[in-house]
Amino acid sequence: MSQVTTCSFFKLDNFSAKWWAFKQMQLGRLAMKKVDGLTFYKILGSGAKDGFSAKPNFGTYVLLCVWNSEIDAKKFFMENAFYNKYKSKSSENFTIYAKAAETRGLWDKRQPFEKSVSLENGHPILAITRAKIRMSKVISFKRKVGNISDDLQNYKGVLVSIGVGEWPVIEQATISIWKTKAEMMDFAYKKNGPHSKAIEFTRKYNWFSEECFARFVPYKLEGRWNGEDVGDMLSKLKLEQS
């Protein structure tokens, strides 16, 4: 059995639920210790403006997990008290199951994702990017890349995107689902585009003390988001591209 990565998104509406979720950024670590089959995890908060603002959004959180197998993931989702309490407090939630296809860099001094599949043209892609910004470079970083998030939100090829992080401003990540590899590559490397410029600036100004990039093949979605059942999203996209 090959490694599986899951991203679980939670939306919380009332104050008590938001306060509970906020506390789990630290307290939740106890619940995630010694989970069978779990090799890596992160409880991630988000920012305003779909996660891309330094101002926190106390209504959206993400649980990123890496598993030895899908069996381990399913057992956790069915039986784990912490996860199921999170679900019960959420007004909406959904989970992406995916397998890593391309990885580069480190997260907490390790590469948590093991490649087991290849990306296919015309099929959806899950992308995760994460960077730890040097304290001395925070102001420079914010000034130079402020418009990338707006460009991403308006790009027609992205289905879901959210800016998340372990700590505000300093440790940031983006999780996004793309219709196809071609559309993701067009956004990432379009000549003179904001993202390609950010890559150039990153090399020039040495913004990051650590960075990790990974692309995955998503193969299953479960749950609801923004009032819609996401379960058949992938199959519909594959039909559109065929």
Image (spheres, rainbow, N blue to C red):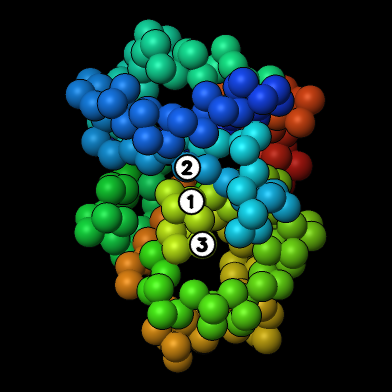
**Kind of residue at disc 1:** Gly
**Kind of residue at disc 3:** Val
Label located before the other in sequence (3 or 2): 2
| Rendered image: mark on residue 1 | none
Identify the secondary structure beneath mark 1.
Answer: strand
Mark 2 and mark 1 in contact (Cβ < 8 Å)?
yes
Give the residue displayed 43% in from the left and 49% down from the top: 166
Read off the residue under disc 3.
Answer: 169
Read off the residue under disc 2.
Answer: 44
Label located before the other in sequence (1 or 2): 2
Q: CA distance from mark 3 to mark 2?
A: 13 Å
Residue 33 position within the rendered picture, expressed as x and y whole percent measured from the top left:
24, 27
Would residue 149 be visible to someone looking at this image? yes
Give the residue displayed 69% in from the left and 50% down from the top: 48
Residue at the farthest top position: 79
Q: Quadrant of residue 72 in the image?
A: top left
Residue 230 position within the rendered picture, expressed as x and y whole percent measured from the top left:
68, 27
Q: 75 or 204: nearer the eye?
A: 204
**Kind of residue at disc 2:** Leu
